[in-house]
Image: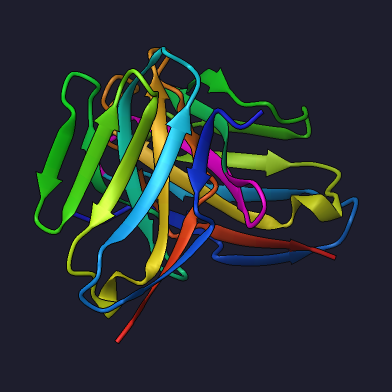
Amino acid sequence: KAGVTQTPRYLIKTRGQQVTLSCSPISGHRSVSWYQQTPGQGLQFLFEYFSETQRNKGNFPGRFSGRQFSNSRSEMNVSTLELGDSALYLCASSLSPFTDTQYFGPGTRLTVL
Amino acid sequence: QQQVKQSPQSLIVQKGGISIINCAYENTAFDYFPWYQQFPGKGPALLIAIRPDVSEKKEGRFTISFNKSAKQFSLHIMDSQPGDSATYFCAALNTGNQFYFGTGTSLTVIP
């Protein structure tokens, strides 16, 4: 069974631009969560989607948004990029929001110049 | 506010030694405590997990010790190997199904 895939793997943007990251969960998984990973803060929860609905949201500004499609694929968008948005963005999938085990993708490395 | 505090930030252990990583939490609503292992260029992978109704769980060389009254849990890696060199994250899941992660421990096992 294929794992979680994320595209693109690397991205370089400049301040003020916007970016869209994509995540395809493991087949049959319907819950997708997004995390931001930085050296100083570790993994911080962004949001979780299930059945195209956002169930949970972390403590991030409104510039961070996401959505989930009917095939469970998810995208996250960051508008008006800031230097501090440079991070590894990880997507994790699980069968449902009510199961414990999350499977992470390799992440998208975003660099904001 | 860091809901899960992890220490040490980095750890160097000789091959064959015991690696110990500690985590502490504040929120008593947490009811599932996993540990993840992350290699460079990869996403975190679930290593071992425990629920608060047991005090210890062992899987091969990896053991979680859980102290509910102290709100602490730790990962012990016995007979540490160079292949164990990675970053380890503890995490806690609350009853609202939201994960909180520690800041990670970079483990280096010296041959």
How far from the left and from the top, in percent, is residue B80? 23, 70
Magenta highlight on residue A41: yes
Residue A81 vs B99, above or below: the answer is below
Residue visible at 56% across and 29% down in the picture: A47
User: Start and end of the magenta stretch?
Assistant: A27-42
Q: How many marks?
A: 0
Percent of width and height locating residue B86 = 39, 67
Q: Is residue A62 left or right of residue B11?
A: right
Q: Position of residue B62 (x, y in %)?
A: 18, 53
Q: Residue at x 71, y 30 (%)?
A: A60
Q: Is residue A76 left or right of residue B32?
A: right
Quadrant for residue B30, please give it: top left
Q: Residue at x 39, y 24 (%)?
A: B71
Q: Nearer the viewer, residue B49 or B110?
A: B110
Depth check, front residue: B65 or B50: B65
| Residue at left offset 26%, top offset 52% | B76
Q: Is residue B97 above or below residue B46?
A: above
Residue B70 rendering spot, x and y as whole percentages: 38, 23
Position of the N terminus of chain A, as image quadrant, is bottom left
Q: Is residue A54 left or right of residue B57?
A: right
In the rendered image, which quarter is residue B61 located in?
Answer: bottom left
In-front residue for pair B22/A7: B22
Visible in this render: residue A61? Answer: yes
- The quadrant the C terminus of chain A occupies is bottom right
Q: Tell me, what colour scheme is on the image?
A: rainbow
Does residue B43 appear in the picture of this structure? no
